[in-house]
Image (cartoon, coloured by chain):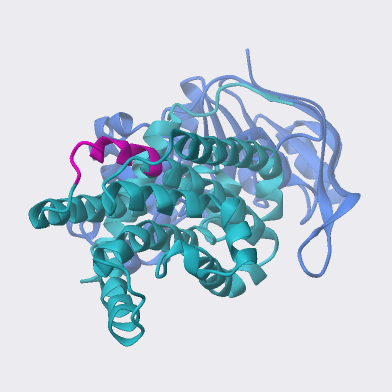
Chain colours: A blue, B cyan
Amino acid sequence: MASIEIDHLWQGYHGATVRGWRRRGEHKWALRDVSLHVDAGEMVGVIGGNGSGKTTLLQTVAGVIVPLQGTVAVSGRVSSLVELSAGFHRELTGEENLLIGGVILGIPRREVRASFDEIVAFSGLSPEALRSPLRTYSAGMGLRLGFSLVAHSNPDVLLVDEVLAVGDDEFRARCVERVHELRRGGCGVLIVSHDLDLVRAHCHRALLLAAGEAVAEGPAGEVVDRYLESA
Amino acid sequence: MTVGARTSVSSWELLRALVERQVRVRRKRSILGASWPAVAPVLLQALYVFVFGAVFDVGIPRYPEYLFTGLLPWTFLAQTIGQTVTSLSSEPDLIRRSPFPYELLPITTVVVMGMYFLATLAGFIVFLGVRGHLAYAVLPAIVLPVVALFLLVSSISMILSLVDVYNHDLRLILANLLTVWFFLVPIVYRPGMAPRPVRFLRSVDPMNMIVGQFRDILHFGQLSRPLHAGLMLVVCTALFVGSRAGFRVLSRELAKDI
């Protein structure tokens, strides 16, 4: 069963004037006729150079932006490991941010409460840190908190944008393992990364984007090799 | 098109969380933060009572009460709009990350400021009651201008916050525009004191209708004409429905533009 079904997707941005107003009728295409499916329990990587359309693809699947042409269908709840500190406030404590920020990021409060201890244990933050404002955290601590929250939100579809490089090696390994745990539970994972080794080692399939077009799709190792040859 | 369920959080639960976040943040590292929206109209009242009651005598009986019936809804409107104008621009990461009804961001501030407004209004009603200046029979009608005021402030907040995403000039000139609007509405003076063109502008100004209703009920102790109350509600409801529909259409590509 497909978790994500992308069919002939076209996505683009308006041209803008220097003063910030849209230019009517002008589109800079970010994705051109891209199709992809991700099955439940499958991890698919999206690779490509800067500006190839990877993040736009993720934002469209997340429902943040609406396709200009084509369709994107997802089954179930989508969680995004993107912009991990979004929804958090610097003045609130770690605990407050988990409970309030979780809802803002689309996770019902009862679910955050139910898995609160698990989230905290996964983040590795001390009880004292949890009672301190986020502004006193290092960048890594804030990202750990954000990752732990989203990673325990029981998603059916997980979108990951370059954030598996969070924290130290030990935490990074736990993050990757947690994503696999979710995948094994039936979650479809779409991961955008410049880390080709990670895509090769952990993804079943990969999609190579270049200037918004899908130029290769198939087993992760083959697509990564194709990208390296073309780079 | 995009299909499929993406979140399990209802708009109501999300609004509650956003309101809770804003209330908690106001209390952090601030002594005045939590109470300032309620204190501000009282301080402004003291200033205007001195200027227009003592220095320039406008000759209005029970002037402090007359003034406060206008100043209270006005400060709610002005303070709220001043804060909501950047409510979208200040959350680019959140908007680029999560799909949700983005109008909840300005509406959150309206709700938070509205709580302070209602608390101050309740205090003022108690004050009028203690002074023996309250007409209890007409008091329930205060609900109508309160509802109209919330609809008006929400409408303006949604539209201005969206405009600010595309052009930041508005936040620079907003205070000046509000000052002009303030003096067009008969808050510090009697309605009949303004020249004819101003009176015409006032006839189509929903804030003028709202202040008139507040004043009729709380100061003069009488009900406004049903036609006036009905017109006020129709205008404010139409503004709200139109603004919300416009916001929904114009914010479809917000994550791309912010």
What residue range appears in magenta? B135-145
Q: Residue A43 location, x and y as percent?
A: 61, 30
Q: Which residue is most to the top?
A: A1
Q: Quadrant of residue B113?
A: bottom left
Work out whether B115 lies above or below A70: below
Left or right of residue B167: residue B108: left
Q: Residue A4 location, x and y as percent?
A: 66, 24
Total tally of numbered discs in the picture:
0
Work out whether B53 lies above or below B203: below
**Which residue: 53% across, 69% down?**
B194
**Which residue: 66% across, 33% down?**
A61
Q: Residue A72 location, x and y as percent?
A: 72, 26
Q: Main secondary structure of the magenta part?
A: helix
Left or right of residue A155: residue B126: left
Q: Residue B37 location, x and y as percent?
A: 30, 63
Q: Which residue is most to the right?
A: A25
Where is the N terminus of chain A found, in terms of image quarters? top right
**Which residue: 11% across, 53% down?**
B132
Where is the C terminus of chain A found, in terms of image quarters? bottom right
**Which residue: 69% across, 40% down?**
B252
**Magenta stretch holds residue B14:** no
Residue A97 appearing in the image: no
Q: Quadrant of residue B22?
A: bottom left
Q: Quadrant of residue A174?
A: top left
**Magenta stretch holds residue B138:** yes
Relative to the observer, which residue lies in front, B175 or B123?
Answer: B123
Relative to the observer, which residue lies in front, A175 or A58?
Answer: A58
Q: Which residue is most to the left?
A: B130
Left or right of residue A208: residue A98: left
Relative to the observer, which residue lies in front, B112 or A102?
Answer: B112
Residue B198 appearing in the image: yes
